[in-house]
Image (cartoon, rainbow, N blue to C red):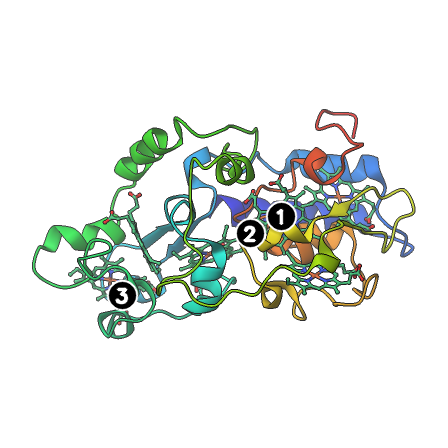
Amino acid sequence: MAVRFCCIVASAVLTVLLAGDDGKAIDRGELGKVLQVMPPNGPLWKYGNVVMRRKSAKAGMAPVVFPHWSHRARYTCRACHLELGFSMRSGDTGITREQYLAGRYCGVCHDGKTAFSVRNGDPSQCGRCHMKDTRDLEKRFDTFAANLPMTSFGNGIDWGEAVRSGLITPANSIHTERFTMQFPDKLKVPTKLGTTSPRSDVIFSHEDHFAELDCSSCHPDIFNIKKKGTEAFTMERNMYGNFCGVCHMQVAFPMNDCRRCHPQMSNSTGY
Ligand code: HEC
Ligand code: HEC
Ligand code: HEC
Ligand code: HEC
Ligand code: HEC
Ligand code: HEC
């Protein structure tokens, strides 16, 4: 919720800043101002949590809190978003109790073997997802994060480094190793992006992303597969949650961390 809220605030500020815009890319200083009004995404344990309350509220149940940090340490994005069909837009999957009791979605793993069960029996199990109170989850985050490499934004965890150093080993597939395509040699050299701004210095690594995602996670829905083929690919659109912002506003390290995408920028006030 905190993340959504700050996006709304940023969008409102952007709208003001862009009034009278002549179609040119947003000025770097102004962009900096927008990003400064976005809180650093609230507490670390909340970043990437998806709160689901629509069906729960109607049924008089506490909202469900789905923490990405806990799950992404065990499974790659592709395991859930490709294999199990979870949407990357919160609410879109429309999960129901009937579905997960039939072994779909959360029920694939929350069967009492891989993870605690969704079934009746011990009523205290219900509260592990339908959380009246999130203090326990917050405490578990502190223990979880204690030994992982740190960064300044999002969960405060350097997820890429955690995987590379073997501190976490997320599974690529739920069912025993599914066929995964070989990473194409042709894409080993990172792509320099240069769609709108001549001074842009963003270099995109396919290989880093392939560790977590499939080609179809990004092509063709988010990015055109033709180099420089993605239209209106600007920083503002990123911050509205499009393009890189589909993931880098909600789950992967957030947009505040300018330097990780723009190696020539600093994260301090200067931009
Ligand atoms: C264990 C399963 C699981 C894993 C692993 C997982 N996700 Fe998710 N993801 C979900 C669920 C469930 C939702 C909520 C879907 C809904 O509300 O319909 C979600 C939602 C999202 C959203 C939308 C969030 C929002 O607030 O709008 C994004 C973006 C996302 N995931 C990206 C990722 C990325 C990137 C990774 C890998 C680093 C990842 N997910 C790993 C299950 C998973
Ligand atoms: C791919 C397998 C998988 C899927 C799908 C999955 N989970 Fe989990 N989940 C796990 C595992 C494994 C654990 C940790 C084991 C345990 O605590 O029993 C876990 C733990 C949790 C926790 C406790 C987090 C913590 O670290 O304290 C919550 C809450 C949770 N899941 C909610 C959900 C919800 C809600 C969904 C569906 C939207 C879901 N999970 C889908 C595997 C999964
Ligand atoms: C692994 C996580 C998880 C556990 C454990 C769990 N639920 Fe749910 N439950 C969900 C999710 C996700 C939804 C959909 C949330 C929403 O949209 O509000 C949901 C929705 C519901 C709904 C709304 C009605 C509907 O058709 O979807 C009811 C009622 C419900 N759960 C009851 C229970 C009861 C009772 C228990 C304990 C026996 C339980 N749940 C345990 C994840 C869980
Ligand atoms: C997740 C990666 C990512 C992060 C983090 C990021 N950017 Fe960008 N940025 C991009 C991409 C992609 C483009 C468009 C590249 C292109 O057109 O060549 C871009 C373009 C820009 C531009 C050029 C103007 C425009 O609208 O295209 C500016 C200025 C900019 N970013 C500033 C920032 C600032 C300031 C931050 C941090 C507060 C930041 N960016 C964080 C990916 C990122
Ligand atoms: C995280 C998102 C993401 C994933 C995952 C991804 N791509 Fe891309 N891809 C991009 C972006 C961004 C571009 C640049 C688009 C532009 O310039 O408009 C691109 C461009 C390309 C290009 C043109 C680049 C060139 O140098 O000619 C090819 C070919 C391509 N992708 C193939 C793939 C294949 C094959 C996979 C799976 C192995 C894949 N992509 C996975 C984001 C992704
Ligand atoms: C579909 C989701 C998704 C999209 C879209 C996406 N990324 Fe990522 N990206 C990730 C995930 C997951 C990681 C792993 C690190 C993390 O979660 O913080 C990552 C890591 C990175 C890293 C750091 C690599 C490392 O480990 O040091 C950079 C830089 C990056 N992305 C840039 C971009 C840029 C630029 C774009 C847009 C052109 C983009 N990403 C689009 C999901 C995505």
Whether 114 is drawn above or below 47: the answer is below
Going by the numbered disc 1, the residue's amino acid type is: Asp
| Lateral position of residue 256 relative to residue 102, left or right | right
Q: Are marks 2 and 1 in contact (CB under 8 Å)?
A: yes
Going by the numbered disc 3, the residue's amino acid type is: Gly
Q: Where is residue 195 in the image (x, y as percent from the top left)?
A: 85, 56
- Residue at image position (45%, 37%) is 166
Q: How busy is the neighbourhood of tag 3: few (under 14 within 10 Å), some, or many (20 plus)?
A: many
Q: What mark, if any, has residue 211 been given in the picture?
A: 2
Q: What mark, if any, has residue 208 been given in the picture?
A: 1
Can you tell which of label 2 and label 3 is closer to the viewer? 2
Can you tell which of label 1 and label 3 is closer to the viewer? 1
Locate ligand 4 by image quadrant: top right
Q: Are marks 1 and 3 in contact (CB under 8 Å)?
A: no
Q: Distance between the residues labelled 2 and 1?
A: 6 Å
Badge 1 element: helix
Q: Does the residue labelled 1 lie within 8 Å of ligand 6?
A: yes
Q: What mark, if any, has residue 107 been given in the picture?
A: 3
Badge 2 element: loop
Badge 3 element: helix
- Residue at image position (41%, 53%) is 171
The quadrant where residue 17 appears: top right
